[in-house]
Image (cartoon, grey):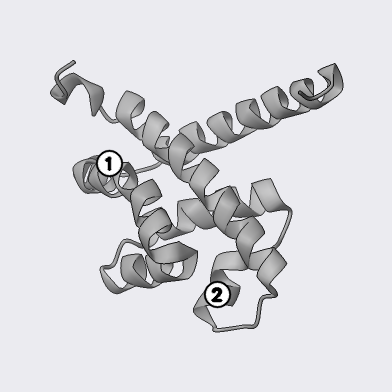
């Protein structure tokens, strides 16, 4: 179990990620919200199945640039590493530690993009409980 200070840092970081995700999701154009929501709902599973690199390549190929951009911004915020997504797209070498750190961060970021997408873009009202 972490110390009180570690727990507070985690809560603060989660709050920062939530706020960043909220701001990013709010900027999605009205006519693209359904597609965006569909994409972020499956983002975490896609990262688990295909890895961060495979997910980014797939999303780029499908023209899902907004999702890639948002994911990249959040990963940068969480890892304090500049341009991770761009570096991956340019096939720049990343050591295993940096890549794994980015992939773990991507999973956390995907969670927040999905949550905020469901709340702000209306995904929960279409689901049955």
Q: Is residue 83 visible?
A: no
* Quarter location, residue 17: top right
Compared to residue 25, the image places residue 82 above or below, namely below
Percent from the top left, x then y, of residue 121? Answer: 28, 31
Task: Tell me which corner region of the image, top left, top right, bottom left or bottom right, holds residue 18.
Answer: top right
Question: For the residue labelled by badge 1, is the local secondary structure a helix, a strand or a loop?
Answer: helix
Viewer-proximal residue among 2 and 42: 2
Residue 34 position in % (x across, y down): 20, 42
The label on residue 118 is none
Q: What x and y, as percent, mark residue 4?
A: 83, 17
Q: Earlier in the sequence, mark 1 or mark 2?
A: 1
Mark 1 highlights which residue?
Answer: 37
Q: Which residue is drawn at 64% across and 54% down?
A: 76
Q: Within 10 angstroms of label 2, few (less than 14), some, or many (20 or more) residues? A: some
In the image, which is nearer the foreground, mark 1 or mark 2? 2
Residue at image point 30% right, 47% down: 42
Left or right: 86, with 115 as reference point: right
Q: Which of 61 and 54 is in front in this view?
A: 54
**Residue positioned 65% across, 82% down in the render:** 93
Quarter of the figure with the C terminus: top left
* Image position of 118 (left or right of 52): left
Residue lying at the far front of the rendered structure: 1
| Residue 129 seen | yes
User: How far, Cα to Cα, is label 1 from label 2?
Assistant: 24 Å
Number of marks present in the image shown? 2
Expressed as whole percent of the image width and height from the top left, the position of residue 92 reads 62, 83
Labels 1 and 2 touching (C-beta < 8 A): no
Mark 2 lies on residue = 88
In the rendered structure, the answer to whether residue 72 lies left or right of residue 68 reads right
Residue drawn at 76 percent across, 23 percent down: 1
- Determine the image quadrant of residue 65: bottom left
């Amino acid at each position: 179990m972490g110390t009180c200070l570690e727990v507070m840092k985690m809560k603060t970081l989660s709050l920062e990620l939530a706020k960043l995700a909220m701001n990013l999701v709010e900027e999605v154009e009205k006519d693209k919200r359904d597609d965006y929501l569909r994409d972020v709902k499956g983002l975490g599973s896609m990262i688990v199945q295909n890895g961060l690199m495979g997910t980014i390549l797939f999303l780029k190929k499908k023209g899902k640039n907004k999702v890639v951009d948002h994911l990249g911004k959040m990963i940068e915020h969480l890892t304090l590493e500049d341009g991770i997504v761009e570096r991956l797209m340019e096939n720049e070498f990343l050591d295993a530690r940096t890549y794994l750190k980015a992939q773990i961060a991507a999973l956390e970021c995907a969670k927040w993009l999905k949550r905020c997408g469901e709340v702000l873009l209306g995904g929960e009202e279409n689901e049955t409980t």
